[in-house]
Image: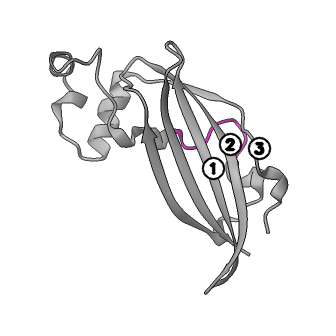
Amino acid sequence: MLDRKFIGYEFEPSEMTIPRWRVTQFANAIRDSNPLYYDLKEAKKQGYRDLPLPPTFFTRMTYSGKKNFYATLGIDYKKLLDGGRELKYYSQCVAGDTIVYQTKVENIIDKEGKRGKMDIVTAVTRGKNKETNDKVFDAIITLIVFH
């Protein structure tokens, strides 16, 4: 059973400046051949300042801080099940932008299911553009931890 004292716990912020090569590397890894992620001229032609990020790029920023999320909460990997992720987008982000992101434990709920007792952990990582202070994304993560 996870300690409820972690509800509301915020990990220290992290930041990532996104170089072009990371955008193209990520697009290649997910097998997205859209020229927007590879060709600066094409991106600018379509109205972007630089190469835009593929929508799922922000999954790379799921947890912030130097502390390990799972170790801090006392989560045993052998009892962990990914309960899903949701990404909400607020503003466009392109190569060259610096994103500041921070993770907060929103809730820990104790439940009982067919496999026994479990904790449902909800954490949210919020990202904003460092230069413009625009909100860029929320990544809502749900984890299931069996007792």
Residue named by callout 1: 123
Residue depicted at 34% across the width and 23% down the height? 20
Q: Residue 114: image x %, image y %? A: 61, 87
Q: Quadrant of residue 90?
A: top left
Q: Which mark is residue 104?
A: 2
Q: Relative to 5, is 88 on the left or the right?
A: left
Magenta span of residues: 61-68
Q: CA distance from mark 3 to mark 1?
A: 10 Å
Compared to residue 7, the image places residue 115 above or below, namely: below
Are dots 1 and 2 in contact, CB under 8 Å? yes
Q: Quadrant of the N terminus?
A: bottom right
Q: CA distance from mark 2 to mark 3?
A: 6 Å
What secondary structure is marked by label 2?
strand
Are dots 2 and 3 in contact, CB under 8 Å? yes
Whether 63 is among the magenta residues is yes
Q: Relative to 105, is 61 on the left or the right?
A: left
For label 3, count other residues whose C-alpha is less than 10 Å away and answer few (under 14), some (14-19) or many (20+). some
Residue named by callout 3: 9
What secondary structure is marked by label 1?
strand
